[in-house]
Amino acid sequence: MKLFKQYAFNLIILGFCLFGTQSIANAQSSSKTNKPFVVVLDAGHGGKDSGNRGNGYYEKKIALNIILKIGKILESNPNTKVIYTRKKDVFVDLIERARVANRADADLFISVHCDSHTSQAYGAGTFVLGLHENQRNFEVAKKENSVIFYEENYEENYDGFDPNNPESVIGLTLMQETYLNQSITAADAIQKSFVANLKRKDRTVKQAGFVVLKYTYMPSVLVETGFLTNAKEGAYLNSSKGQVQMSEAISKAIINYKNSLSSSVITSNSIREVLEEAEDVKEVVKTSTEVVFKIQIAASSKDLEPKSINFKGLSPISRENEKSLYRYYFGNTSTYDQAKKLKKKARSKGYRHAFIVAFKENKKIKLSTVIQR
């Protein structure tokens, strides 16, 4: 056990020495040497949901054509695996699109759409999940989120989420916060590719509350390739030339993003997992009625109500405030075996870095004080 803990400690020190704290904070462990880089490509809308019909065009068809072309390019890239949420004109629930990505343990999720507006607005934009900063961003998200009304049992599937209520967005953001930096990095790569390769108007990377991004457990980006309601841009996006150029620009950005990830970078999350697994190998728990185990599922600067609706249906949820950082815990048990089951449940819900925390007299204590070999 001492050797294992020494190994974990050395691993952490090596990570800090070689890569620095910024790399550790920003990188994710999704770049694994033993698996290909998995990209899930999502063509927005489909089937009974045509998407926007600016100038008579079909968003669903344009998005699918671009996605298929992106996939063809990426499939020729070494050590890259492409998975599609749809490859033909069919309707797919938003939550199922996310589940496709989660089941694949994807490294990146890209959802492609076309925008619309009452004016002759133009330009390509990229979005990551977050709180909308203005009414325009909210309107874009509301338009894309309204797709859920096509789905059966949408109220149950989305925990009562209301696309027309700005307050509903708050509960969306926490799950993706773990991947926010990487999502922004990927979105920025796509945005820069549009500008550098196609001279498109730079609408910058924005944050908004998109349901399809909420339920993914990896860096995720929604791309608005342009405005079908703009006469010139709509014709461009509906053309074979425009679709080829857009797919090439997005593909280049994805490949650049993939290449920027270092498989050897040790992340803050992987460090936490090493230490947590070091505790898990201990076999004997010092029983004490005063000790309570909880599962930390998230830490955020956002103050969310500890309700199950905000945490993928998990209950009970408790909240702790530490120096402007809110920590959210699932469960409450006096047995370590039950705590491990709760941790497994939390991870199955998407909180892949959930870990066990021990409390005594409402104060956090080290697991090593209550667990021994």
Image (spheres, rainbow, N blue to C red):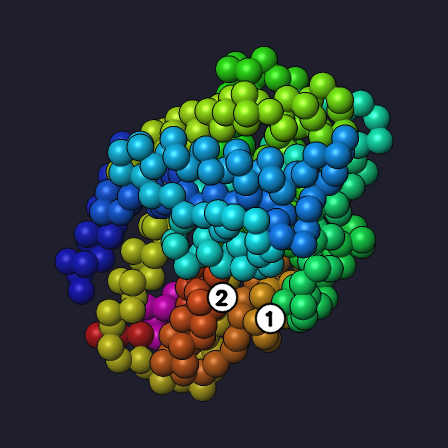
Q: Amino acid at mark 1?
A: Gly
Quadrant into which the C terminus falls: bottom left
Label 1: which residue?
A: 313
Report the side of 122 relative to 183 (left or right): right
**In the image, is residue 300 above or below residue 60?**
below
The reply to whether the magenta stretch includes residue 164 is no
Report the disc number at residue 360.
none
Q: Residue at x 52, y 75 (%)?
A: 331
| Left/right of residue 335 with respect to residue 189 in the rendered view | left
Residue at 75% across / 47% down in the picture?
142
Where in the figure is residue 297, as x and y percent of width and height?
50, 62
Please determine whether, in this image, residue 80 is positioned above or below residue 102. Answer: above
Residue 311: x percent and y percent?
60, 64
Q: Label 2 near label 1: C-beta < 8 Å?
A: yes
Q: Is residue 33 left or right of residue 239?
A: left
Q: Secondary structure at mark 2?
A: loop
Identify which residue is drawn at 66% across, 35% down.
Answer: 114
For disc 2, the marked residue is 349
Find the magenta span and give its range: 364-370
Instruction: Judge the density around disc 1: few (<14), some (14-19), many (≥20) Cα neighbours within 10 Å.
Output: few
Identify the secondary structure beneath mark 1. loop
